[in-house]
Amino acid sequence: MSIFSLGLKSLGWHPLFDAYFNEMVHTVSTFQNASQKLLPARVLAAFQGIYRVGFLAPDSPRDNPLLMESLAELTGRFRHHTHHSQDYPAVGDWVLLEPNETRTHARIHGVLPRRSAFTRTKAGTRHGAQVVAANVDTLFIVTSLNQDLNLRRLERYLTLAWESQAEPVILLNKAETPSCSHDGERAERLKEALVALESIALGCSVVPLSALYQQGLEQLTPWLQTGKTVALIGSSGVGKSTLLNALMGEETMDTGGIREDDGKGKHTTTHREIFRLPQGALLMDTPGMRELRLHYSEEGLSQSFQDIEELIKQCRFRNCSHTTDAGCELQAAIEEGSLSEGRLASYLKQHKENAWLARRADPVLQANSKQRWKKITQSYK
């Protein structure tokens, strides 16, 4: 294992990146005439065109690697040849860095291929992609035991999470253990919430905890290992920043409450940033997401709704609409109570969005769709 692999392990370096890095160094050195030695660096925070990166000092001793931080910006060549927003560096990315002589500023020449990427359609658009978190091992999808507990929205998070290639874990925050024996109503709410979450969280863990009262945090230890990267995602007000502070053991981020009338949260995190926890794990805090449009997620959709897709295979007709057709296994499951109408509606809606995104990306599918609708219109005429 190279000194880079050893020294950068605490920043989340994976041996898979060794080959990517060597290949990119050769390409950049040949065509871009980099003046200094190029280094691998990880994007720790991103601002308006400026990035904060962490890297290993080139003269660092093997037995005592020295990690440094610097501000960095993109080279003009990189900007000129990059046309899609998802190809720009995102927090968590590994990049090809050229630091200046004092190592206080640097230039980014390229982005190494990602091991995982939580990607959504950019807010306010219908097709622009936004990489929310790159190269994470685990996604903590944070929700809370109040009005924010929205199963349909969590299903969308799970679809994108499974597509990202990272492991999703649902954290039910604000699930304080009732302090009084007569607080049966809250205990019942917690029990019902866990049952509901487990009905949609197929293949992933559900962890109840309280960040504010620091209850249940020890359950997160299996995912918070040295060199592992975990991202906190979820809506505003679910307690992501409070959880970060609890795990850091200090007031690292400002926290805000929620509006009592509707349970909606306030934005307290304004940018994505990676923090190193005392136990050695890397935790990425992200701003709350009030709009969560799918990016093309075929594998994620199948993984998130594997129960429904298994039932679809048993439908009587291959082109079953899963609404009123005779012999539909999904409708039978709804009647017997093993499947909820809301979950089926969520699946059909996400499936429709995915099909639209696929047609937009594929000219052949787009042309076939146009021809189909043209024939339908002509038949009506």
Image (tube, rainbow, N blue to C red):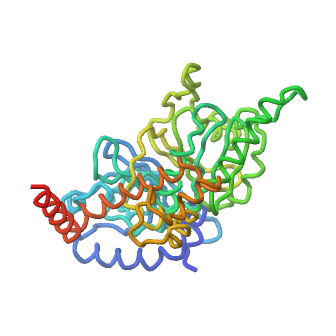
Residue 80: name its quadrant: bottom left
Residue 148: name its quadrant: top right
Q: Nearer the viewer, residue 339 or 91?
A: 339
* Residue 337: % across, % down: 65, 52
Please tell me which residue is depicted at 30% across the width and 41% down the height of the picture: 124
Q: Is residue 85 above or below residue 217?
A: below
* Residue 57 seen in the figure: no
Please tell me which residue is depicted at 26% across the width and 63% down the height of the picture: 359
* Residue 189: % across, % down: 73, 35
* Residue 157: % across, % down: 51, 51
Look at the image and tell me in which quarter the C terminus lies.
bottom left
Q: Nearer the viewer, residue 104 or 189?
A: 189
* Residue 141 seen in the figure: yes
Q: Nearer the viewer, residue 337 or 271?
A: 337
Q: Is residue 299 above or below residue 285?
A: below
Residue 47: name its quadrant: top left
